[in-house]
Amino acid sequence: MIVMTDGLKALAGNTIRNALMRFTRSPLSGAMSGAACTALLQSSSATTVAAVGFVGAGLMSFPSALGIIFGANIGTTITGWMVALLGFKLQLGLLVLPLILIGTIMRLFGRSHVSNSGYTMAGFGLIFVGITMLQQGMSGFNELIPLEQFSSTSVASLALLVLVGLFFTLVTQSSSAGVAAALTALFSGYIGFEQAAALVIGMDIGTTVTAAVATVGRSIAARRTGFSHVIYNILTALGAFLLITPYILLWEAISPGALIANAEIALVAFHTTFNLIGMIVVLPFTKQFAHLIERLIPDKSPQLTDTLDPSLLQEPSLAINALQVAIEKEFHQLLQHIVILLNNNPPSSSDNVAPIGLTKMQQTLDQTHDYLDLIHLHREQSEEWPRLVALIHTLDHMQRLHERCDEDGERAITARSTATLRPQCEQLLSGISEIEISIHDKRWHDATDHATMIASEIREATTTARIAVTTSIGSGEISVADGTARLEAIRWLRRVSHHIARITDHVTKAYSASGE
């Protein structure tokens, strides 16, 4: 499963994730996209990580991401169908050996898509070799865990089997492997249908435990997503447990004896059915479900870097999305500091100035830089390269803009208190307001136009002001010290407006590179 999943991710992972985001506009479309994505990638974890990344990066609403998670549960059942229909019915264990050989040769000697296709092919073949080996090894399975001691009619025994299934998934870290093992045990006659159904229910819950543990210490979006997965699967499992007997009775009513004759098909159908019913029942109440999760896991103290989830680094495109959102939040904070300075209200060193202090701002920028250092791309192989480069330039200008606020803050006060520079201060304040409105509406091109125009006008105006200051110094109208302070204030205005213009321009380029 790992080999095939890795091959599929390398072969079409980015395309599938882009389609996942593009086609997810509501919880319903999210569920359909999630099911399709998981079926194609053969990995619910890859789908879940993508959903977490989209929410964290502000590209998708939390309810829409929940739809993806609901659908991912259905997508995972495809593995069971593949095993039941091909692994048992067609007995492909020996037939796929040449396929594995061809796939290995393609992986070793091919390049790019050929190599990834070979890896996928080899993984596909290995699944059926594994199924054959599972059947052969099942002879000792009964001695290890005597499942016949668990009564198929006792609720307590079936509940215990649910826990066995949960534990199996925790050990193997793969519900797909667990379902394959349960199918093999059922096909080999070591357990009955009721026992296999209870095991599969437990394995469905087991996948959520792994996801929940993986979100510890992660972003709010990751924790909410992981926790919602746990609650949803537990609710679905409770419904599935109650569904076992009615499901068996329905099979017997339609075709007596068919369930025993086609037990493995019936088990996979049961797995798909209870996940489908769970999705149909919960989907209309997705918004209410999302509100419940948000209440259970409130965002008490939102941080500027809360999108920088380490788990997203496995998928560079998602990590870059998260980085871009963090940079936009930090840019807003820096603009607020400039407004504070130009309003003659300099931030104190106590770090209590709204929204956050300059020392914390520096720590935030450093954290963002550290995260950026962990994103590595190959220029020739990645479509994300232009966007990453644009964000590197953006962060560089933001660091320098922070220096203007922190180290040169007094120069802003001088500019504000100097009558000849007050019009440029007002112009910069007005421009920042226009820029923030454009950014809020996601009109980055307009923000860039505003910022560039303001920087150009301030540069022209301050050139004239600079000449006037030096003339006043030379004529003795002002002292050298006062004149120097005014020249520093002029330099501050020019630098700040320049950095703002460059930041908006680079973020605009980042959006253009992402196709937005």
Image: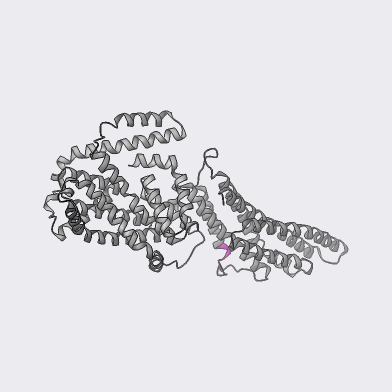
Above or below 345: residue 143 = above
Residue 53, image x, y percentages: 45, 54
Above or below 119: residue 478 = below
Residue placed at 78% from the left, 60% from the top? 462
Residue 463, image x, y percentages: 80, 58
Q: Number of marks in the image?
A: 0
Q: Nearer the viewer, residue 340 or 404?
A: 340
Please say whether residue 354 is one of the residues in the magenta stretch: yes
Quick check: 156 left or right of 368?
Answer: left
Q: Which colouring convention does the figure follow?
A: one colour
Residue placed at 64% from the left, 53% from the top? 505
The magenta region covers 349-359
Residue 296, image x, y percentages: 38, 67
Residue furthest front in the image: 254
Task: Tell me if residue 414 can be seen.
Answer: no
- Choose top left, top right, bottom left or bottom right for residue 229: bottom left
Image quadrant occupied by the N terminus: top left
Quick check: 38 left or right of 237?
Answer: right
Q: Nearer the viewer, residue 123 or 226?
A: 123
Quick check: 423 left or right of 366?
Answer: right
Q: Main secondary structure of the magenta part?
A: loop
Please say whether residue 351 is one of the residues in the magenta stretch: yes
Task: Tell me if residue 212 can be seen.
Answer: yes
Residue 352, image x, y percentages: 55, 70
Residue placed at 18% from the left, 51% from the top? 255
- Choose top left, top right, bottom left or bottom right for residue 419: bottom right
